[in-house]
Amino acid sequence: MARVTVEDCLGKVDNRFQLVLVATKRARQLAKGAEPFVGWENDKPTVVALREIAEDYVTASILDEEPEEEIDEAAALIIPAPAEAVPQADTGLPKT
């Protein structure tokens, strides 16, 4: 396995900041169980993500994707749960 460097990936994205965003998003996908486009070879998700970027399997367009899971998490933050589903903290004070 050849080592992947940041220089191998910089020509594939606009700048090094975008590289960080693309590699981070792909590494998280891999860590959650996404199928890699290159051989895993006992590497960490970050290394596999960089190898995928260097070999043009992953591009900056990954930043435009918004998976259902992220949408569901965002909706859960916006839409309040029903009052009966929210547990009340026991303050130790008498109830009035």
Image: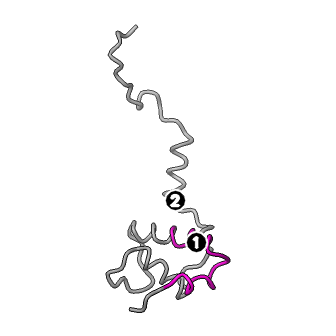
Given the image, on which type of amino acid does mark 1 rest?
Ile
Q: Nearer the viewer, residue 67 or 15?
A: 15
Q: Quadrant where the N terminus lies?
A: bottom left
What is the x, y in percent for residue 86? Answer: 42, 31
Residue ID at (54%, 81%): 6
Q: Is residue 4 left or right of residue 43?
A: right
Q: Name the residue that disc number 1 marks.
A: 62
Which quarter of the figure has residue 39? bottom left
SS type, badge 2: helix
Calculate the distance from the C-alpha at mark 1 to the C-alpha at mark 2.
Answer: 14 Å
- Residue displayed at 52% across by 36% down: 80
Residue identifier under label 2 = 68
The amino acid type of the residue labelled 2 equals Glu
Q: Give the SS element for disc 1.
A: helix
Residue 7 within the segment the image draws in magenta:
yes
**Residue 72 sits above or below residue 41 on the image:** above
Nearer to us in this view, 30 or 24: 24
| Above or below: residue 38 compared with residue 84 | below
Q: Quadrant of residue 46?
A: bottom left
Which badge, 1 or 2, is on the more N-terminal residue? Answer: 1
Q: Residues within 10 Å of mark 1 (few under 14, many from 20)?
A: few
**Picture residue at 43% right of the left edge, 88% below the top:** 3
In this picture, is 47 found above or below 2? Answer: above
